[in-house]
Image (cartoon, helix red, strand yellow):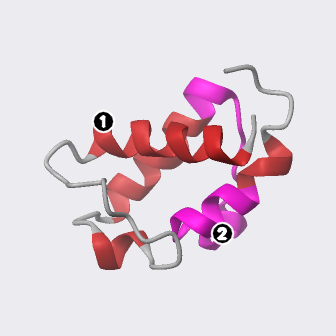
């Protein structure tokens, strides 16, 4: 997957987890928690959805790489290079 496809995939996951949130103006550099009403369970849901939908394993020690859209896409790009859309 290309970075833009990964971004779209993450937005789809966020739409499912936080359907009432406006994701149209997400700042890629700002932490999700500062922009959205996400708690720790929502964050774990993101990790689980990545595993379920794309078979991407994110070890707990790497969770900090998923704190913003920009860092999430950067982290996932090499992990999802062979994932078909």
Tally of marks: 2
- Give the residue drawn at x 34%, y 53%: 42
The residue at the point 66 percent across, 21 percent down is 85
**Residue 53 falls within the magenta-colored stretch:** yes
Residues 59 and 12: in front is 12
Secondary element at tag 1? helix
Mark 1: few/some/many CA within 10 Å (<14, 14-19, 20+): some
Tell me which segment is drawn in magenta: 51-75
Q: As displayed, is residue 43 above or below residue 50?
A: below
Which label is found at residue 16?
A: 1
Q: Residue at x 86, y 28 (%)?
A: 82
Q: Secondary structure at mark 2?
A: helix
Horizontal and vertical percent position of residue 38: 28, 63
Judging depth in this view, the residue of 21 and 38 nearest the camera is 21
Considering only vertical position in the picture, is 50 above or below 14?
above
The quadrant holding residue 34 is: bottom left
According to the picture, the residue beneath numbered tag 2 turns out to be: 65
């Amino acid at each position: 997957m290309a970075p833009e496809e990964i971004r779209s995939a993450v937005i789809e996951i966020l739409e499912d987890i936080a359907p009432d949130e406006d994701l149209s103006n997400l700042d890629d550099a700002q932490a999700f928690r500062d922009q959205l009403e996400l708690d720790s369970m929502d964050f774990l849901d993101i990790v689980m959805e990545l595993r379920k939908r794309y078979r991407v394993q994110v070890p707990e020690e790497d969770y900090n790489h998923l704190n913003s859209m920009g860092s999430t896409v950067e982290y996932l790009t090499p992990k999802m290079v062979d994932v078909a859309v």
